[in-house]
Amino acid sequence: DAKTTQPNSMESNEEEPVHLPCNHSTISGTDYIHWYRQLPSQGPEYVIHGLTSNVNNRMASLAIAEDRKSSTLILHRATLRDAAVYYCIPANYGGSQGNLIFGKGTKLSVKP
Amino acid sequence: KAGVTQTPRYLIKTRGQQVTLSCSPISGHRSVSWYQQTPGQGLQFLFEYFSETQRNKGNFPGRFSGRQFSNSRSEMNVSTLELGDSALYLCASSYGTRGPDTQYFGPGTRLTVL
C-alpha cells in the first residue's frame, strides 16, 4: 500500500481558495488517488478521485502531478462548512476492494 | 435515497461483555466495510463483506467478527470486550464492483467500554 504524507493542519480564510497537498511517492501505476473528508462528529465523506489527469466536480478540483508522486486538492472558495479532516488515499482496485487505508489526514480550519 | 444507517448510535458496555453493531447500507449497495476510529490509531479497516462473503480483512484479533445478510445488511460482533475497544465504529457501503467505487459512510456507533 502506498504511504502518504500530508500536513497535520492548515488554516484558511472563508471564501479564499485552499490547496491541500499530499505526497504519495510510492504510489503504483494503477492506484487511484481518492480524497475523503470527515466533518466533526460525522463519518467520512467522499470528495473526489482521479488517476492521471486533473479532475473537477462540484465540491473540489484534484490536481495530480505528472509523475503522480503528489496531488493537490483544491477548494475554490472555502466555507465554514469545509472545516474538516481531509484524507488523501491511494487505492488499487486490482484485488483489495472496499479497503481504504486512512492516514492521519490534514485538519483544515476555516476562519470567518 | 436514504443514506447508510447504523444502530445503535451509542453504546456502553463493561469489560468481558460482547456487543453487536448493525449497519444498513444504501439500497443497491452490495459491499459493506467496517472501520474502527480511535484518537490514537485513527481510522483502521476491520473487514469488508460482499454478497454475504468476507472479501477482505484488516489486522484485528479474532474477537472482531462480522457477517452480511442476503439483503446486504451487516452486523459486526466484538466478543470479550477490552477497554481498548472503546472507539467509533463506522460502516461504509458501496456497489462493490471493480474499479473506483465511492464508499458512503454512516454516522458511526460510539462504543464505550468501562
Image (cartoon, grey):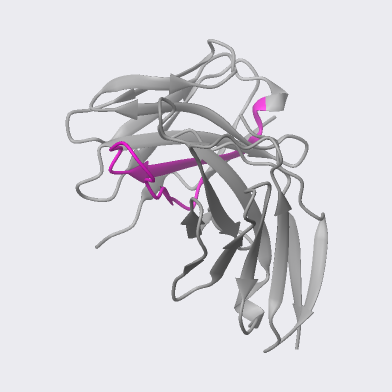
In the rendered structure, does residue B89 fall within the stretch colored magenta?
A: yes
> In the image, which residues are magenta?
B85-108
Tell me residue B23's x, y (percent): 36, 40
Residue at the far front in the pictured view: A66
In the rendered structure, does residue A112 fall within the stretch colored magenta?
A: no
Tell me residue B22's x, y (percent): 38, 36
Tell me residue B85's x, y (percent): 65, 27
Residue at image point 40% right, 32% down: A97
Q: Is residue A25 left or right of residue B32?
A: right
Residue at image point 62% right, 85% down: A77
* Residue B36 or residue B45, whichever sits in front: B45
Q: Is residue B54 left or right of residue A25?
A: left
The answer to which quarter of the image holds residue B73 is top left
Residue at image point 34% right, 27% down: B49
Q: Is residue A77 above or below residue B50?
A: below
Residue at the far top in the pictured view: B62
- The quarter in which the C terminus of chain A is drawn is bottom right
Residue at image point 63% right, 41% down: A102
Tell me residue A103's x, y (percent): 69, 42
- The quarter in which the N terminus of chain A is drawn is top right
